[in-house]
Image (spheres, rainbow, N blue to C red):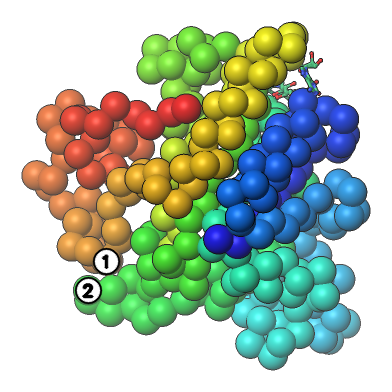
Amino acid sequence: MKVLLVFAHPEPRSLNGALRDVAIKELTAQGHEVLVSDLYASGWKSEVDRADFPSLAPDARFTPVRASGEAFAADALTDDVQAEIEKLLWADVLILQFPLWWYTMPAILKGWVDRVYAYGFAYGVGEHSDSHWGDRFGEGTLAGKRAMLLVTTGGWEEHYAARGVNGPIDDLLFPINHGILYYPGYDVLPPFVAYRVDRLDEAGFEATAERLRERMRTLATTPPIAYRRQNGGDYLIPSLQLRPGLDDPGVTGFALHLKGAAAAAPAQD
Ligand code: FAD
């Protein structure tokens, strides 16, 4: 398979840098092709602004959605964005790797999503009708491909458990897994999370590395998170609410959007 790893840590000698190398080595040993987008090393521009749309008239009001759609349709996106889009189309698997910063991804990675996910490419795709609300959440440009998160946290695993003060990790990662990866069509694998890493010793590193190698070995076979398809009949259109009666007893919140959430324990690694 072809794997794109988007790496969002400023220090190559960090734990994240070491885990990235572990992942690449294992993937290569398995015969996969790997490309890395190293956002800090490449000086990735993270904010969306007028400079992203050179064809926009200087006196025109800047509307990011419209500018994005027009530039995508006219093949006029900037070279850095176009290169990332081509990598996404090339890759069978996308891995987003980052340290958890303030309960989400570092700003540079959010800015990669904001700029690379152009209108007409990642959103604004497909028709809207009484039974179909655009190609998204299970359909879209990137359907048929797999994606997963590789995350490190300072907090303990217990702090991210169902009753933990930080909130459950699957809830914290839902906007990324569901809103950023599932939205344009990816099958989203359970995240790889390494907890409590700030004082990791050699033994802890080796155990984490081995867990990661195993995930890299099973990239093609790990079952994806069972999110419901938006256009598959589970949601009312146009309210896009889960149909009454489909929810499992006792299941609330983000887990409503999982099939069989009551039976399946939240997928964490
Ligand atoms: P590093 O600091 O590079 O390394 C961590 C440890 O791993 C070090 O002790 C290092 O010696 C050791 N290590 C062991 N083996 C190796 C090896 N082979 N190579 C490299 N290192 C090794 N945490 C949360 O839980 N929730 C948050 O919301 C949160 N917000 C944060 C916000 C900010 C702005 C920052 C800076 C941190 C935040 N943190 C948070 C903590 C953060 O998630 C961790 O510091 C981060 O995940 C650690 O990853 P790292 O790659 O930076 O580790």
Can you tell which of label 2 and label 1 is closer to the viewer?
Answer: 1
Q: Amino acid at mark 1?
A: Asn
Read off the residue under disc 2. Answer: 131
Can the viewer see residue 25? yes
Figure quadrant of residue 182 = bottom left
* Distance of label 2 from label 1 (alpha carbons): 7 Å
Mark 2 or mark 1: name the one nearer the start of the chain: 2
What's the residue at 34%, 29% (across, down)? 266
Residue in front for this viewpoint, 42 or 200: 200
What's the residue at 70%, 35% (across, down)? 22
Read off the residue under disc 1. Answer: 231
Can the viewer see residue 110? no
Figure quadrant of residue 206 = top right
Q: Is residue 229 above or below residue 150?
A: below
Q: Quadrant of the N terminus?
A: bottom right
Q: Amino acid at mark 2?
A: Ser
Pinpoint residue 92: horizontal percent, then vertical percent. Answer: 54, 63
Figure quadrant of residue 58 = bottom right
Task: Find out if the beta carbon at label 1 lies less than 8 Å from the nearest ligand 1 atom.
Answer: no
Q: Is residue 257 left or right of residue 116?
A: left
Q: Is residue 268 left or right of residue 206?
A: left
What's the residue at 42%, 55% (across, down)? 187
**Secondary-structure class at tag 1:** helix
Query: Ligand 1 sits in which quadrant?
Result: top right
The reply to whether discs 2 and 1 touch (Cβ–Cβ < 8 Å) is yes
